[in-house]
Each structure stands twice: as structure tokens, then as C-alpha cells.
Amino acid sequence: MLRIAVPNKGSLAEESIAILKEAGYRQRTDTRDLVLLDNENAVEFYYLRPRDIALYVGSGELEGGITGRDLLIDSGASAQELLSLNFGASTFRFAAPSDVEWKISDISGKRVATAYPGLVNHHLKSLGITAEVVRLDGAVESSVRLGVADVIADVVSTGTTLRQAGLSIFGEAILTSEAIVIARKDVAIPSELEILIRRLQGVVTARMYVLLDYDIPKTLVEKACAITPGLESPTISPLQNLEWVAVRAMVKRRETNHVMDKLWALGARGILVTDIHACRL
């Protein structure tokens, strides 16, 4: 029986359950349930605090789990990233008082407040910078004003909260995080986990692409295929009108309308878009 950890709350929980459902796995309907057994797929799901998941997987108690890249690095656990899931994105940045222009090198010897000490220590070490990392569980942006730290390292979206605290972002991003599937390091991946990863990869791809069908004169097929090359090559089928053919190709969802505009201008007609619910590529 494969044992998989799923975030029980927070920003990753709802989307983790949604993608597992799309991949064909049962999920809990009551948030009080801590364990769910999916007999059909031979998987036991454990609903755990997101911060703890990497530790359980790294210790070998569980074969895999879904967590954030930031939480994996911060934990220092003996676990590795296997698949990015394309949701739960966040960016970690340094910020300091706005009245001084800071550089990354200025962090040396200073106090850095963060809720992710493992992540920040790892990043500072990679930069060859020595600083005191102060762990806080929340309200990190207030630490400078209250005299606890000189600099902060935190998740940044719009930067509004930082500006309100008199802070400005500086330097390159520490990390761009998102939801990922993890497994223990230096251990052979079980076949059941490989199946789960393929299923999830299929959902991730299906969310990124749509199927585009259209009719085009034979004389314009080459130009049309340059617009819709597909993943390997488009499918081209004959029509009753021998001067025309039907073309089918996968197109990135975010580019769909631009591609349709180009095809119409070229001379394509009967352009149809279909959602992809799952795939194996």
C-alpha cells in the first residue's frame, strides 16, 4: 500500500486535493479525517501539516507527498523534488528599510528575520554570506521596526505590506516556490508512486494545453502547421472536399486566442477548441 502525504490546510490543501481527484484518486470529504484509504488505487493518504510533510517523507515513514518547494528546502529533510504541479506559486525576497539603498552584500553581519530559517540559511550559505537568522512564526515585516532584525526574508506578492512597514525589496529572488511532489532521497521510487506521478503529470499537462481542430486548404497546410506544430506533429485528416484537410494539434491554453486569430487570417475555418481532461505524453 502506497502512503502519500497531502497538506491538511493552508494555501496548498484545496488544490492538492483537486489535482489528486482529477488524477483518479479518492480524497476526503470531511476535513476532520486524518487518513483516507483508496483501495481501488492501493493508496493511503495522510493529511498532515504542510511543514511536516517533507520530514515524514525524508524519514521513510511515507513514500511520497505534496508540499511546497520552500517547505522542502526549509526542512532540510532527506527528500527530493520529483514533479512540479504548477500551482501554489510564491516568491521569496529580501527587504530592508526604504531609506537606505541595500545590496545583497550588505546583509553580511546583519540580523535577518524570517519564518523560513532553513531556506534562508541555505541561500546565504550559497552566496558566501554570514548573517544571524532570526526565526519568527509571523508578522515578519514588523521585526525591523521593533528592533528584532535589520533585514527580513519573506514571501512577496504585491509588496503592499512591505511598503506599509517602510520596507523595500532588494536583490535577486531567494526562491520561486510552488507545489511539488516529493520522495525520499537515494531510494528507488516504488512503481505505485511512478504511476501517481504519471497521472499527476497528465493532469498538469492537460491543464496547460487544449486540443485545436480546424479545416484548412491543402495549399496552406505547411503554413498552418507552422502556427500549430503540436507536441510532435499535428494530425492531418482528409475531408470530403479534396481541396481541404482537417488538422488537430495541442496548443498552449494561454496562447489559444492568438493562435485562432492567426489561423483565421491565414484561411482556416471551423476552428474548434476542446478541453483536455487527462493525458499521457
Image: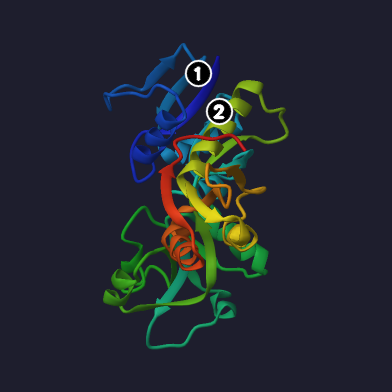
Question: Residue at label 1?
Answer: 43
User: The N terminus lies in which quarter of the figure?
Assistant: top right
Q: Nearer the viewer, residue 18 or 177?
A: 18
Distance from the alpha carbon under mark 1 to that under mark 2: 9 Å
Residue in the image at 47% along x and 87% along y: 101
Q: How is the image coloured?
A: rainbow
> Residue 186: horizontal and vertical position, in percent?
73, 34
Q: Nearer the viewer, residue 175 or 256?
A: 256
- The residue most toward the top is 39
Task: Give the left or right position of residue 144, taking residue 30 as reference.
Answer: right
> Residue 42: horizontal and vertical position, in percent?
52, 14
Question: Residue at label 2?
Answer: 196
Amino acid bearing label 2? Leu
Numbered disc in front, either 1 or 2: 2
Q: Are marks 1 and 2 in contact (CB under 8 Å)?
A: yes
Instruction: Tell which circle, 1 or 2, labels the residue nearer the N-terminal end.
Output: 1
Element carrying mark 2? helix
> Residue 127: horizontal and vertical position, in percent?
65, 69
